[in-house]
Amino acid sequence: MERRTPTIQTLVLALVCASSALGIVLISRAAHGENKSKGAAALWLSWSPEARTSYVWGYLHGFEQGKREGCSFQGDKTRAYVRELPAPARSPQAACLDTLPKYPARYFQVYADAVTEYFTKYPNDREAGAPRILEELATPPGLTVDQIHEKLTRQ
């Protein structure tokens, strides 16, 4: 029986799912009580700036941890299956990490401000939630708030 190593696309999908799940849990906890009936924009805008930054920190921390763990898993599995091949110039884990999206801004506030800008400009956009906006802010694609809105409304 042949075993196959996970593809980069599978790992990216797993990372996106894990990041989205984290976002859903955080939003669900914040939405408990009076915020339960609010949409994503109203909920986000009801939070303090500190709560928004904390959300983004949690999202980015989970995303980076998921990348490291996913690529480490792939690297371990790749090494196990290709023992007879010559060693590559770079480790499979490093190659995996280089292919995944990045958040290049040095401060979490940059991303919290972008989500706030999005929800302020487009409060009725039902296609967007904080996790989806953050996903589109990563590089690549590294979209602007207006580009994200255009992409989501055209789907």
Image (spheres, rainbow, N blue to C red):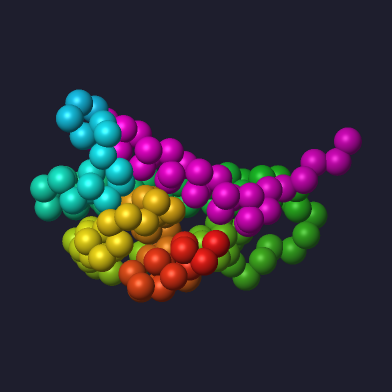
Residue at 63 percent across and 55 percent down: it is 9
Which residue is drawn at the image coordinates 86% and 41% (left, top)?
Answer: 2
Magenta stretch contains residue 6: yes
**Residue 64 image point, x, y percent:** 39, 52
Quadrant containing the N terminus in the rendered view = top right
The residue at 63%/50% (across/down) is 10
| Residue 34 or residue 30, whichever sits in front | 34
Observer able to see residue 69: no
Residue 3: x and y in percent read: 80, 41
* Helix, strand or loop: magenta stretch: helix
Whether the magenta-drawn stretch holds residue 48 is answered as no
Judging depth in this view, the residue of 112 and 87 nearest the camera is 112
Which x, y percent locates residue 30? 23, 34
- Residue 46 place in picture, x, y as percent: 15, 46
Q: Considering depth in this image, is 123 or 84 the residue closer to the camera? A: 123
In the picture as drawn, the residue positioned furthest to the front comes out as: 124
Task: Name the residue located 30 percent from the left edge and 43 percent from the top edge.
Answer: 39
Q: Nearer the viewer, residue 128 or 13?
A: 128
Q: Tell me the magenta residue range.
A: 1-30
| Quadrant of the image containing the C terminus | bottom right
